[in-house]
Image (tube, rainbow, N blue to C red):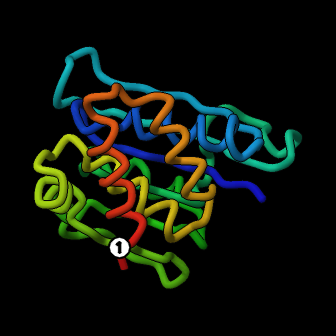
Amino acid sequence: MKHEVLVIGRGGQGILLFGRVLGVAAAKYAQLHVSATESYGSETRGTESRVDMIISDKLEEIDYIKVRKATIFLVMYPFNLEKYMDMISDNACIFLNATYIEDFPEKPDWKIHRAPYTEIAEKETGTIRTANIVALGHVVGKTGIVKPEHVIDAIREIVPSKWLELNIKAFNVGLNLP
């Protein structure tokens, strides 16, 4: 089992926290091998943020530190989408934050999931700051990349106590999205 996960969005959307939680869930709690990189603009908010993560049950399958062909692709905000189109594998699971993304090219083998993560987060938790974790729940629920309890353990480890219950709630909401 090997997954190449590519997450893009803008600064302030919690893209890096998404990657950190998923990485800890996979490496520490699911005992999988993980390689991850992150990039972001120098401004605090508004510039492109990106996480590349390779997760595998076999160490030898992690042969590069960046995604070459994403099997899981999450777009929280449509920064330069055209530059990522060639990085999506033929049978990818694609997750789109429908709050910001209306149009997205489709290929027959892609499994595209759309949900307004930002709107759902605000409605269910009272803040848009949990949209990343709603999206994480959706990704985990649809792909089975790690067990939900591994993610909840990682959230408990990483997220500050004042945000803990909201993030667990957000994850569970995302986990149950259609």
User: Who is closer to the viewer here, 89 or 144?
Assistant: 144
Image location of residue 51, percent across then percent down: 47, 37
Position of residue 31 in the picture relative to residue 14 (left or right) = right
Which residue in the structure is indicated by mark 1?
Answer: 177
- Identity of the residue furthest to the bottom in this view: 108
Image location of residue 143, percent across then percent down: 57, 67
Image location of residue 17, percent across then percent down: 40, 33
Mark 1 crowdedness (10 Å alpha carbons): few <14, some 14-19, many ≥20: some
Q: Amino acid at mark 1?
A: Leu
Q: Residue at the location (60% across, 42% down)?
A: 25
Position of residue 4 in the picture relative to residue 163 (left or right) = right
Question: Within the image, what quadrant is residue 176 found in?
Answer: bottom left
User: Who is closer to the viewer here, 156 or 109?
Assistant: 156
Question: Within the image, what quadrant is residue 170 found in?
Answer: bottom left
Image location of residue 82, percent across then percent down: 35, 54
SS category of the residue bearing label 1: loop
How many numbered marks does the figure carry? 1
Q: Residue at the location (69% across, 37% down)?
A: 27
Is 141 drawn above or below residue 39 in the view shown? below
Q: Residue at the location (22% across, 70% down)?
A: 103
Quadrant assignment for the N terminus: bottom right
User: Who is closer to the viewer here, 154 or 38?
Assistant: 154
Q: Residue at the location (35% across, 48% down)?
A: 133
Is 82 drawn above or below residue 162 in the view shown? below
Is 107 drawn above or below residue 8 in the view shown? below
User: Who is closer to the viewer here, 144 or 13?
Assistant: 144
Is 35 drawn above or below residue 71 in the view shown? above
Quadrant assignment for the C terminus: bottom left
